[in-house]
Amino acid sequence: MSGPRTYPLEVRDLGVTLDGREVLAGAGVSAGGGTWLAVVGPNGAGKSTLLKAMMGLLPHTGEVVVDGVRVRDLKPRERARLIAYAPQSPSLPPDMTVFDYTLLGRTPYIAYLGRESARDREIAGAVLERLDLSGFATRPLAHLSGGERQRVVLARALTQQAPVLLLDEPTTALDLGHQQQVLELVDRLRAGDGLTVVTTLHDLSLAGQYADTLLLLAGGRVIASGPPRQVLTEPLLARHFGARVRVEPGTDGRPLVHLVRPGDR
């Protein structure tokens, strides 16, 4: 029995200029269908800009291609059925409930001037349950903590049921338990539903533990890409993060990154 259909993603020579300043240049990204790519890099490297450009939210040069289809050729509703995006700091309507906000993820499937179906509501409810948010369904967004809001933003993106999922720092403001819960859920969806996942991640060890491939950005340019053990190396991290680190394999062989204090050996 064959698994779910997967959608490979390719970004070719992507460039973004904002206010006359080049913030991303010649970026090439490749993620096989059903794989997880994590974008890492120091603050200001262009990680969030890359995801926004891939989603078509910023003017850019170059091409974004999903399963052979150029994203720029798609209408917004078609694009939203293909790519879902969860921003790091979204603007949330304070009086809207968690359930209604999550249900917005079904917008690409609802006819203009139409209403959501029972199936749409069922999908939204199932996603809230998976993210441990069912108890918050009727709560206004203004009454959520930072971590709860982060999970609700992810819930809306997952409710979209697009085969490509772009997540900008999905673990921001989450405590340790919810970080693990969210990343494990994303990984199960990737494996079970065949999602192609692209995330930016601040925590290098988390990126190394979960992603199939890493992309290191610095100064708006791709510095390195490949399996985690090839990207998370002590020389590369020291050069581009300005930090003393020790990288060692975990029990599963994936790299773990540790800060080394001055004077430690």
Image (spheres, rainbow, N blue to C red):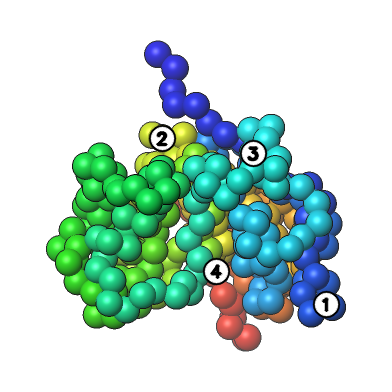
Whole-percent x, y for residue 207 in the image: 53, 57
Give the Cα distance between marks 1 and 4. Answer: 24 Å
Q: Secondary structure at mark 4?
A: loop
Quadrant the N terminus occupies: top left
Q: Residue at x 74, y 63 (%)?
A: 59
Callout 1 amino acid: Arg
Mark toward the viewer: 1 or 2: 1
**In front of the other: label 2 or label 3?**
3
Sequence-wise, which precedes: disc 4 or disc 3? 3
Which residue matches tag 1?
Answer: 21
Residue at 55 percent across and 69 percent down: it is 202
Q: Secondary structure at mark 2?
A: helix
- How crowded pointer 3 is (Cα within 10 Å; few <14, some 14-19, many 20+) is rated as many
Query: In the visual, does 230 lie left or right of 141?
Result: right
| Residue under label 3 | 66
Q: Classify mark 3: helix, strand or loop.
A: strand
Q: Which residue is mark 4?
A: 202
Residue at position x 65%, y 57% in the image: 56
Taking the image as shown, residue 223 lies to the left or right of residue 82, namely right
